[in-house]
Amino acid sequence: MKRLLSPWGGGLALALIAVVVVVPVLHVALPPGSWLHPSDYAVALAGKIMCYGICALAMGLAWGYTGILSLGHGLYFALGGYAMGMYLMRQIGRDGVYQSDLPDFMVFLDWKALPWHWALSDSFGAQLALAVAAPGLLAFVFGYFAFRSRIKGVYFSIITQAMTYAAMLLFFRNETGFGGNNGFTDFKRILGLPIATPGMRAALFALTGATLIASLALARAIVTSKYGRVLQAIRDAEARVMFSGYDPIAYKLSIWTLSAMMCGVAGALYVPQVGIINPGEMSPAAGIEIAIWTAVGGRASLVGPVIGAFAVNGAKSWFTQVFPEFWLYFLGALFIAVTLFMPDGIIGALRGVPRTLARRRGAGAREEGARADGVPARTDVAAGEVQA
Amino acid sequence: MRRCIALLAAALSLSLAAAPAAAIDAPTLRAIVDGDTDARVAALHAAVSTGDATLAPVLQAMLDDELKFDEAHVWRVHDGQASDAVTGAAATLPDEAQDVMVNNRLRGEAQAALAALRLQAPDAAVRAKAIATLRDAPDESQLAIVDAALARETDPALKGQLRLLKAATLVASPDRAKRLQAAGLLATGDDPATRALLGERLGPRGESDPEVRAQLRSALAAVDAHLAAGERLGVLFTGVSLGSILLLVALGLAISYGLMGVINMAHGELMMIGAYTTAVVQDLFRAHLPAGAFDFYIVAAVPASFLAAAFVGAVLERSVIRWLYGRPLETLLATWGISLVLIQAVRTVFGAQNVRVENPSWLSGGLPVMSNLVLPYNRLAIIAFAVLVLCGVALLIARTRLGLFVRAVTQNRRMAACVGVDTARVDTQAFALGAGIAGLAGCALSQVGNVGPDLGQTYIVDAFMVVVLGGVGQLAGAVVAALGLGVLSKLLEGVAGAVLAKIMVLVLIVVFIQKRPQGLFALKGRSAEA
């Protein structure tokens, strides 16, 4: 019988639940002057980073546990965001600059009616479903073809990057019907309620927190199940899994699609809190940043990626305010340092130095093996490096 | 050379012969400078049709508002000195002399007349310009002088131009036979101006005679065919040009990824280093060497950009990449981090703005092939450069000791180490070589595009697509994939626009990978981990 939670994992979960309850209550109940009152900025920032945390967790499932490094998760995140953004654009109603029933950018482009893909944009439920379904469907189709032809490792990563790059170019076009360069912004209300009130901020924060906790619980259920065991086996030695009679494609495809859908949910939560979505979220740089959150926190764990998202984005907020010109140096150094010195991220470091050392000695031996067999080494990152 | 001398001699004799010969007479000039505008234009046409070269300076003086006249004489006043406009002898200006008025119509006529006179100029470039000026407003009065020029012209290209000019003059003639002749002449044209002229004549206010119309229509078809051929060749050329750039970018990747299995996301930034090195060399040449040397800065910039990028590459290999062999995904992340640092470093040192890199004079301009197809010299040079680099790399890999070691280490690292190859050193050298080629690519790019901190990011996705498409470990794959992608994307751009073309190419690559996951030229093997 497995324990439900490791002792400090349980503590962390409790702390997270406490934060998710306490912060919104304080934000609404206390007057803005009070020293305990979390500022608008702080609540919005923390809410945004929790969305990133969900993304990083989804990335951890795909990369840390299954060995599929995606550089295109920014696309799934943005698709979810755009689906929610379409609904929010429709909620503006006639309060836009042009006082038209159509969103401002369509008036600007001289469009007379909503394009076909906006057909459901008046319905909150439908757009929410779309925020999950669109990334899921795209990931399923893309993954089906990629996994079926056994594209893996770096090849796969590069193609995901090309995909998000192509999507970014597509969304930059005005003709695509998603507001081109500017994307969606200037939201006024959600479900008929004004969007920029402390109450709405607190509600969205709590909702995001709850989603994050639910995602952690779901991910935990997955990785401790037999299915999760097979995923980790695929990460460590896919050929052996295949020869043992499992079909790796079904496993990889399902976790890949689930991961994309989680990103879509995160995107849908992100847009109302941040108030803007544009094609920049799909840039290759944004996609690869998700990978670094995951790596910094420790990709082969569940809380690790969430911690990583908070650490990196917290640092980003601080740097861009205090030393904007040094942020890229720091981020670049972080990429290098984490891959060189902290392959298991913050979580790995916390779990004890001696074990890390032993593992790295083991990894060194394997590296020799990988390079000796002639083919340009395309063994997986994690090749047996991490025990969950 | 001999032809040059002959031309020069002919020009000399022409100018000597022209100078003292039958000068324009006073009554003619008097008719041009004063009277009813229609009469003045008629007089001007009559004077020009004689082809008298002495008319030119007088007309120029008229355009410069330097002519004055009285009842019988015309004077030219230049810098306060009056002279007789016909003989050139110094004279005193009578008090009753009036300014010559030049209205817009006369100004245009005088300019056309000057151009017509310039058709006799000894310099071919002047003649070409004159023809172009005349074609803007063809006029039958110049027919005689055009015919004379046509009889005299020796340059075949200019002869063709003159024939088109004659046709343009005749095509609106009231004489039906002349219009028919003109339509036949126009069919030999191959430029957009001829096409526009034909379109205009075929329009509602143009030709009415059915036979001439038919002739004009077939001429239009012939011109269109000519133009289409030029356009197709143009697309092909830009495609090959893009392909050669992609090839330069991908060659370095083919070494670091194809041979060593290292995904180098900082490859684009190594190109950026090459481009900035070129900019620095250029600035040094401008600042410290005589002006004549500036045209040859590129000769110094090529090795400098190779060395700079190779040095950075060697440092990266020793400090970071070495520790990540066999872990490609981590290499990917670490090199991405390196690229961020390099981009920011360039911003800190050179600023976030693009730096200016000037083409040497021998790389600016282009080679005219057809009227609507000019091949820019810098693009031609890059194609040649890409071929040279490709040959160099192929020779290096196949024929040199370093190439032998690289292949040995790629095929069997342990065995290579056993027979005494210093594998760590070979790794560094090979990676530095790939980086140096990236620097060369950056140097080439600086001649056709912007040099800024984002330079690497622009090409890196495309370059990786070339490597993915071409397959790993083979230079032939990179060549075919680069040229194929270049031409394909330019073809699609013509149909669908730049952005959609890019998306279509990426989708096509993803689909293609389904069929051949190992690229065009895969190493054959039976590994389950393929």
Image (cartoon, helix red, strand yellow):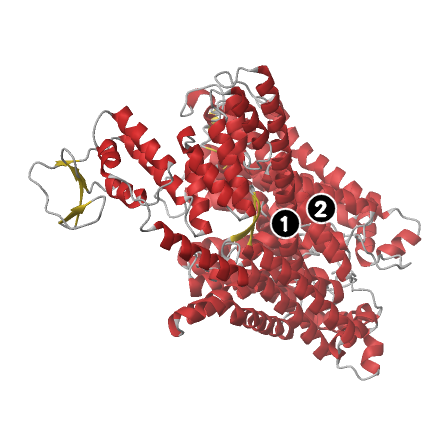
Q: Nearer the viewer, mark 1 or mark 2?
A: 1
Query: Which residue lies at the image location 77% right of the left edge and 75% below the top edge?
Result: B399
Is disc 2 placed on a helix, strand or loop? helix
Where residue A193 appears, x then y in whole percent? 47, 25
User: Is the residue marked by circle 1 packed among few (<14), some (14-19), or many (20+) residues within 10 Å?
Assistant: many
A142 relative to B103, above or below: below
Task: Quote the CA–CA distance across marks 1 and 2.
Answer: 12 Å
Residue type at mark 1: give it. Ala
Residue wearing tag 1: A56
Tell me: A347 left or right of B128. Answer: right
Q: Looking at this view, name the residue that lies furthest to the bottom.
A: B420
Chain hosting mark 2: A
- What chain letter is assigned to the residue under label 1? A
Q: Residue reaching furthest front?
A: B22
Q: Earlier in the sequence, mark 1 or mark 2?
A: 1
In the figure, is residue B235 to the left or right of B168? right
Q: Residues within 10 Å of mark 2 (few under 14, many from 20)?
A: many
The quarter of the image holding the C terminus of chain A is bottom right
B487 vs B52, nearest the viewer: B52
Residue B473's label in the rendered image is none
Point out which mark residue A219 bears: 2
Q: Give whichever of A246, B376 is nearer the camera.
A: B376
Task: Tell me residue A313's x, y (percent).
Answer: 52, 53
Label 1 and label 2 in one chain: yes
Secondary structure type for disc 1: helix
Q: Residue at 53% across / 70% down in the picture?
A: B299
**Quick one: A90 or B484, which is closer to the camera?**
B484
Q: Is residue B482 visible?
A: yes
Q: Is residue B97 above or below residue A327?
A: above
Instruction: Say whether residue A68 is visible.
Output: no
Amino acid type assigned to the residue bearing label 2 in the image: Ala
Q: Position of residue B23 (x, y in %)?
A: 29, 44
